[in-house]
Structure formats: structure tokens, C-alpha cells
Image (tube, rainbow, N blue to C red):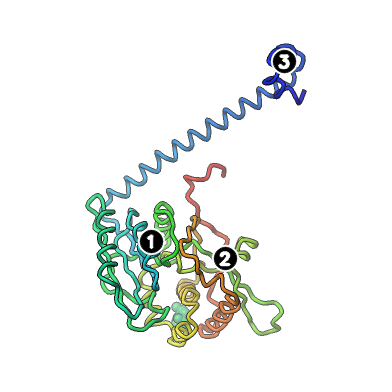
Amino acid sequence: MRGNLFSWNRRTGQRCKQFVITSAGSVKIRILLFCCIGFMLVLLTSFAASFLRFSDFAADDRFSGSRKGYTILINTWKRNDLLKQSISHYSKCQGLDSIHIVWSEPDPPSDSLKKYLNHVIKSNSKDGRSVELKFDINKEDSLNNRFKPIADLRSDAVFSIDDDVIFRCSSVEFAFHVWRTAPDAMVGYVPRIHWLDQESGNRDYYIYGGWWSVWWTGTYSMVLSKAAFFHKKYLNMYTYEMPASIREYVTRNRNCEDIAMSFLVANATDAPAIWVKGKIFEIGSTGISSLGGHTEKRTQCMNRFAAEFGKMPLVHSTMKAVDSRYIWFW
Ligand SMILES: *[C@@H]1O[C@H](CO)[C@@H](O)[C@H](O)[C@H]1NC(C)=O
């Protein structure tokens, strides 16, 4: 009776005969069909429902004028094409208040670049929104530049981002909402982990773990500042309160400013970072994480910083924030 479904189509003439003979089988098929249709209906309604709820949600935010948005703090280096792409994208996002470009190149930004970006922002600003665009020009080329305090920042929330990663506006808004429930925490999309090396004898030695380790254990202890929200007060703390030796180490090694920021926030809050689900689109092709020796360098940084802090401040977590409108089974 298993072949019936197929023979049904092919040999229409014998359909009735077989249908009668194998009525037990056809009952099963009908039940299966009903289940399929039912499932489709459930899917359709939940799609429609989530769409409706999404519109409500968006409208709700747009009209509550007193709420402050967030500032994008974008770090770039000699990749104007990527910068243009990123800013063209993010300037469409709803809660965006201002964009600060951390500029550390020897030459100042060209007039044509400024003109282009201003034009893009203007044409993407709807509903009377006016997004502010500023270049923060630095003389020295150091990775610490990305965490320099910004004078008269209009929002408390800073969304720190590299020029070569893009997240959908809906993901950004969601992470921003998560951050508002925990404004002291670092809230981001790219989790990393550390653990204590068991084989190092009685000396505390920490190992840095990348994407694989997070996936395998479901645990993380930091989120990278290449895509994370945090409070603007941490810019001050990073630049003026954190031990200068850590900033010097970051400048010298051209690495690990994100680990230093994670240490700083964890030490200040005694709490873990928050990992938010969000699909990452990488638009550049040369990430340093793809180069060899990356994990060893990161491990060295972590042990160095732990020594400077006098302890390991990072706290492990297994929590991942997801937008419940997009998950059906729970
Ligand atoms: C870590 O936090 C404590 C308590 O808030 C503070 O006193 C200390 O200076 C911080 N350590 C560093 C290295 O910032």
C-alpha cells in the first residue's frame, strides 16, 4: 500500500479500485494531509500575526518622541567603500541618533567622502529625523581611539561597530531594546569565551576560545566590540580610569582593545555580557581573525590584562536573547 500515492497519479484508471482496497492506507494519507494543511495554516497565521505585531511595535517607538536613540561609533581604516556601504545601511535604521566615525588615517577625510555621506544620510532621514554625522579625527593611530570619549554625545547608548560588518536594522533595534533593560551591560552579537587552563599547575592561566568553543559549550564570557551596545560612560572609564599600561599594550600590539573593554565592563558590573541573536553580514574580506596565531595573541592579552586587574573579571553566561516574535516553539 506504500506505492499507492504514486500509482494514484500515474494510473488514474485504477484509482478507485485501489482506493477501496487500501482504505486503511488512505485514512493515514488523509490524516497526513490534514496535518500538513493545519500546519500550513498555523505558519501563515503566525507570519501574519508577527507582521502585524511588528508594525505596531515599530509605530509605537516612532511616536514616543522623548525616548533617546543610540549613537553608532564606527571604526574604519582606509576602506572608504566599506564605510560608505555601512553608513548607507545604518542610516536607514529607526532609533539612530548620530554617527561618529573614528578616523585615524594620516590624511583627513576627503571632501567627496564627506559630501557623499552627508547626502546619503539626508536622503535616508525620514519623518523629520535628523541624524548627526561627525568624524572624530585622531592624530595618533591606535586601537584605543575607538573608545575615546565623545564630547556632547546626545544619547547614552553607543553601538560600537566595525566598518565591515552589517546587521539588519531589526536586529540592531532589538539589541538596543535588550540594552535598555540592562544599560550597564555590554550587549552584542559576537560572543567569545575564556577558560582556566587545567594543565598550568597552580598558576592561573587562561585560554581564549573563539566561535567553535562557544558553539560547543553554549557558554560565553564576553561579546566583542566589533558589534556591541554599551553605555557611553565606559568610554570615559576606558580612556581615563583603566590602567594606562593596558592601553599601551593595546597600541603596541595592535590588538585586544575589545578584550580590554570587556574586562573593564565586567569589572565594573561584576556581571556577564549579554549575547543577542543576530545574523552577521561580513562585507569586507580581510578579518584579522582569519590570520594565523590569532588565538595565541588573544590568549596572551587575556593573561596580561588579568594580571593588571589583579583578577579575572569576566563572568560566564549561557543566556542568549532572541526576539520572541520570531520563534514559534517554546
Ligand atoms: C575594578 O573595579 C573595582 C571596583 O569597582 C575598582 O576599584 C577597580 O579600580 C577596578 N579595576 C580596574 C583595573 O579598573
Q: Which residue is mark 1?
A: 86
Residue type at mark 1 is Ser
3D distance between C-alphas at marks 3 and 1: 60 Å
- Classed neighbour count for the residue bearing mark 1: other residues with Cα under 10 Å, few (<14), some (14–19), many (≥20): many
- Classed neighbour count for the residue bearing mark 3: other residues with Cα under 10 Å, few (<14), some (14–19), many (≥20): some
Residue type at mark 2 is Tyr
Image quadrant where one finds the C terminus: top right
Mark 3 sits near ligand 1, with its Cβ under 8 Å away = no
Apparent side of residue 124 relative to residue 89 in the rendered image (left or right):
left
What mark, if any, has residue 110 been given in the picture? none
Helix, strand or loop at label 3? It is helix
Mark 1 sits near ligand 1, with its Cβ under 8 Å away = no
> Which of labels 3 and 2 is toward the front?
3
Given contact means CB atoms under 8 Å apart, are the residues at marks 3 and 2 in contact? Answer: no
Q: Which residue is mark 2?
A: 220
Query: x, y percentage for residue 29?
Result: 68, 24
Compared to 125, does 310 lie above or below?
A: below
> Which of labels 1 and 2 is toward the front?
1
Q: Which residue is mark 3?
A: 19
Query: x, y percentage for residue 308?
Result: 51, 85
Residue depicted at 58% across the width and 81% down the height? 300
Query: x, y percentage for residue 158?
Result: 37, 66
Given contact means CB atoms under 8 Å apart, are the residues at marks 3 and 1 in contact? Answer: no
- Classed neighbour count for the residue bearing mark 2: other residues with Cα under 10 Å, few (<14), some (14–19), many (≥20): many
Helix, strand or loop at label 2? It is loop
Residue depicted at 42% across the width and 60% down the height? 179
Compared to 14, does 178 lie above or below?
A: below
Residue type at mark 3 is Phe
